[in-house]
Amino acid sequence: MTIVFQLPGLICRWNMTCQRCLLASFFIMLLSANLIADERAPTGPFQATGFKVGEVTDTSAIVWTRLTARPQRNPSDGPDVTIEYDRSDDNESRRERAVSAVIFENNVTVRDLREAVPGIDGETRVRVRPVGTNADWQTTKWQAVDSMRDFTGQFHFRYLEPNTIYEAQVESRSLEGQVGETQTGGFRTAPSADDAARVVFTVSTGQGNNDQDRPDGFNIYPEMLKLDPSFFVHTGDIVYYDGLAKTVELARYHWQRTYSWPTNVEFHNNVGSYFMKDDHDTWKNDCWPSMKSPYMHEFTFQQGLAIFREQVPMGDKTFRTRRWGKDLQVWMVEGRDFRSPNTMPDGPGKTIWGLEQIEWFLESFQNSDATFRILISPTPIVGPDRQNKKDNHSNAVFAHEGDQLRGFLSEQKNVFTVCGDRHWQYVSVDPRTGVREYSCGPASDKHANGWSQEDYIAEYHRYLNVIGGFLSVTVERANGEPTIAFRHYSAQGDLKHEDVFTANTGD
């Protein structure tokens, strides 16, 4: 067979001894390779913000997904946004000034900002099955992401096996059916209530943007992965809206840049999590539902509540309890939705939790037969906190409800509290009731502040360290006896403090 080909200025018949033919052959192979590479190159949709698995029980879990237009976040040296405020006198707090202008550099939109991760329409589906088996995948139907909810979707899995490690695949495709990126990971289901299984979980708070301690995000995430946690609890201040979130889209921008850090993506693709919110990921510093603030411009408190449920896997209520085997039950409470104004005079009518939540907590906590019970609160129950603070149960302005809770907890056995919010690690024991509290500390050393290392209050403190890091809790049996261990780690993964207790099983 004779092959005739033409290149610019060149017409020839195929001849393996002809240099021009050999040169043409090289160009043809190069062109073919490029065409094949183009066909194989991923064209999206992508999942640059990963996926999250949450609200895990012994038989169920929720998988959160989001589709993105590009495989990575925007570059960090891209356009920025500037907020201008009305002039004010020197005595007025910066957080009370009204916004006069929201200025986008080079007239771009939120999608173009540095570190933004713009979403895209498309469909996702999720497949899960126990690791190391030939079991059939439990597969969802394809579901379109919701463009009105930042291109996110959530899938509820039921009929899972207790105390089982599941592998997960999150697939994507365009609305036209073009195959997009698939991400993989997994999670562990809780042991059933009669299973005295070993459980390890980790706790963190306070991961402000620009407080990262490595080029790809936060070092606590790979350090926590080394402990092979059964689950993770974020106690709130996941993002910090205050300075830039003056619109709904700018609020969503905070979640995009936080959960496109590679450290965060890898962790949440592989560990089931429970997300709690506090002031900075609800609206603004020390906020409550009826608060008014020109400082937040067009972004409202109610919009903040909606965006939180949009950006994390979440069930019907943001206060809930989860059982993890025979020896552990945790309660995660809501501290923003129902609270009275911080400025209201203290007394029986003033509340952080609200009546419904308080009644639910007292009843469910007292009726639990778990060996160890842990209250996880976005803000301190014991403290101590700074004298000028007016936002939590350890402050004088909420002393009435705080005294009620501490009094109730002191009457229970094998009970502990864990809190976020404070930018330092501590272990405290309330001198009046004996309630013991563990503050997990912020996500990085750059975020550690607000307390002096020298200000050790012996009446309260059993451990104090103004550093970043995380808390781990391990529940297991030692010689047949239930034990619980609380360990504080630095952001570099160094063990800083440890408490180990054996359960009090006496009457």
Image (cartoon, helix red, strand yellow):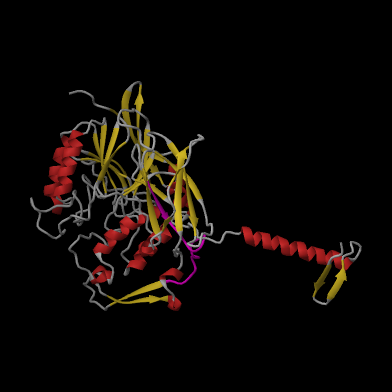
Q: Which image quadrant is residue 493 in? A: top left
Question: Which quadrant of the figure has residue 87?
Answer: bottom left
State whether residue 392 appears in this view: yes
Residue 153's spot in the image, x, y percent? Answer: 39, 55
In the rendered image, the vertical position of residue 478 relative to residue 492, given as above or below: above
Question: Which span of residues is magenta-colored?
Answer: 62-80
Q: Quadrant of the N terminus?
A: bottom right
User: Camera-side residue: 480 or 364?
Assistant: 364
Where does the image place residue 251, in percent across and percent down from the top left?
Answer: 34, 64
Q: Is residue 65 magenta?
A: yes
Count of numbered circles on the image: 0
Picture coordinates of residue 121, whole percent (x, y): 44, 63
In the image, 408 versus 169, the foreground residue is 169
Chief secondary structure of the magenta portion: loop
- Residue at the spot x=36%, y=67% of the render? 250
- Position of residue 2 in the picture relative to residue 393 (left or right): right
In the orientation shown, which residue stands out farthest toward the top? 479
